[in-house]
Amino acid sequence: MTAIISTDRDACAAEPSGDDLLTWILAWSELVVFAALLTSFVVASWLQPGEFAAGKARLHPILPVINTTVLLASGWFAAAAANQSGRQQRLGLLASSVGGLVFLSLKICEYWLEGASLVSTDVFAQLYILLTGFHLAHVAFGSLVLLLVAKFPSRQNVHLITTLWHVIDIVWLVMFPVVYLV
């Protein structure tokens, strides 16, 4: 576990280490957890279609689209940072983190606009908050780690956080149509 965030800038300069296995185990475990949450959301929507249709009608129509664009741009900056070094890499990681923080701000704004409808006890509201809130926690944590890695951008650190950041993107790209469009 000590190799997850390395402060040694030259730790992985030559070739990937065995820590890639930990990165992929973490990435796949996250995907499995989100798959279970999304499956629960879909099954509940089949069992209670009226409640879910009413719940989706309460959601903000534009903010999730903007947030998708912000998160994709953030992912692009992370991918670019993974292929750069020095100042450019740090700026890419910083831009990616800022994108995550903008996503976070817009999602909180969306929650605020939806207000009382999310405090409801219906299954849609509970699963919506659980699913999007769990994703939001990942975005918040990932954004902070991106900032930390911008400070200590070893190849290993950059590889780890950009891989996990792309997992967060993939989850949102699946979640967005399931929660907001279908």
Image: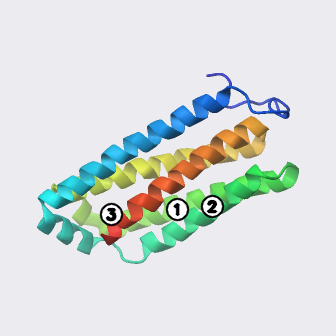
User: Disc 3 to disc 2, how far (Cα)?
Assistant: 21 Å
Please report whichever mark, 2 or 1, sits nearer to the chain's N-terminal start.
2
Check disc 1 and report its element: helix, strand or loop: helix
The x and y percentages for residue 29 are 45, 36
Report whether residue 168 is seen.
yes
- Count the marks: 3
Mark nearer the viewer, 2 or 1: 2
Residue at mark 2: 74
Q: Amino acid at mark 2?
A: Ser
CB contact under 8 Å: marks 2 and 1: yes
Residue at mark 1: 103
The x and y percentages for residue 97 are 64, 54
- At horizontal 66% and vertical 28% (from top left) the residue drawn is 19
The mark found on residue 129 in the picture is none
User: Disc 3 to disc 1, how far (Cα)?
Assistant: 17 Å
Check disc 3 and report its element: helix, strand or loop: helix
Please report whichever mark, 3 or 1, sits nearer to the chain's N-terminal start.
1
The x and y percentages for residue 155 are 78, 39
Q: Amino acid at mark 3?
A: Val
User: Is disc 1 surrounded by few (<14), some (14 to 19) or many (20+) residues within 10 Å?
Assistant: many
Residue at mark 3: 179
Check disc 2 and report its element: helix, strand or loop: helix
Nearest the eye: 112 or 126:
126
Mark nearer the viewer, 3 or 1: 3
- At horizontal 24% and vertical 64% (from top left) the residue drawn is 116
* Quadrant including the N terminus: top right
User: Is disc 2 surrounded by few (<14), some (14 to 19) or many (20+) residues within 10 Å?
Assistant: many
- At horizontal 42% and vertical 59% (from top left) the residue drawn is 174
User: Disc 2 to disc 1, how far (Cα)?
Assistant: 9 Å
Q: Please state if 114 lies on the left or on the right of 136 as rendered.
A: left
